[in-house]
Amino acid sequence: CTLGSEVALRVGGDFFFDPQPGDSPVELVLIAGGVGINPLFSILLHIADLHGYQEGKGNGYKIGTVKLYYSAKNTSELLFKKNILGLMNAFPGKIACRFHVTQQSSQISKDLQPHVTGK
């Protein structure tokens, strides 16, 4: 997003992401804390499937980029972190994630270090 961009915000409740062929691509920003990652991880997996399908078939789906911002007390509480890293590696420039930790007391593993901010 840039200054002046229009954004839609949804907090809690029932929500999903189901773009249809011919829909304009959208840039998604997903924000999660703790176990709140569960529904957003499902959306992230769906987007990865659509990216893979688009690359393989060249159909009408036009998928934009997705940025996930995910916060937890420490890296051990970041659920699905290895899966998320795998998705970022599989779809560079299309899927990105920043992890934020608030109470990290141990060393952050090297595979996570470039993607983690916080203490």
Image: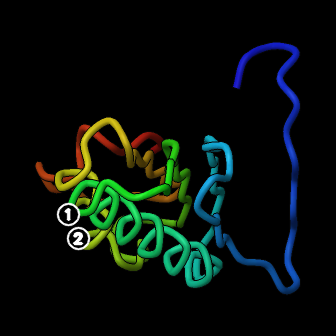
Quarter of the figure with the N terminus: top right
In what element is the residue under mark 1? helix
Q: Which of 102 and 71 is in front in this view?
A: 71
Residue 36 falls in image quadrant: bottom right
Check disc 1: other Cα within 10 Å, few if <14, some if 14-19, many if 20+: few
Camera-near label (1 vs 2) is 1
What residue does disc 2 label?
82
User: Which residue is at 21% across, 61% downward?
Assistant: 56
Q: Position of residue 30 (x, y in %)?
A: 63, 56
Q: Up-down: is 114 above or below 68?
A: above
Q: Marks 2 and 1: in contact by CB < 8 Å? A: yes
Which amino acid, by three-letter code, is at mark 1? Gly
Check disc 2: other Cα within 10 Å, few if <14, some if 14-19, many if 20+: few
Q: Position of residue 103 (x, y in %)?
A: 50, 59
Q: Is residue 102 left or right of residue 79?
A: right
Q: In this view, does 30 lie to the left or right of 51?
A: right
User: Across the whole image, how many numbered discs are drawn on residues?
Assistant: 2
User: Which residue is at 64% across, 47% downward?
Assistant: 29
Q: Position of residue 46 (x, y in %)?
A: 46, 74
Which amino acid, by three-letter code, is at mark 2? Lys
Residue 35 falls in image quadrant: bottom right
Q: Where is residue 86 in the image (x, y as percent from the top left)?
A: 20, 63
Residue that lies at the very extreme toward the left in this rendered image: 110
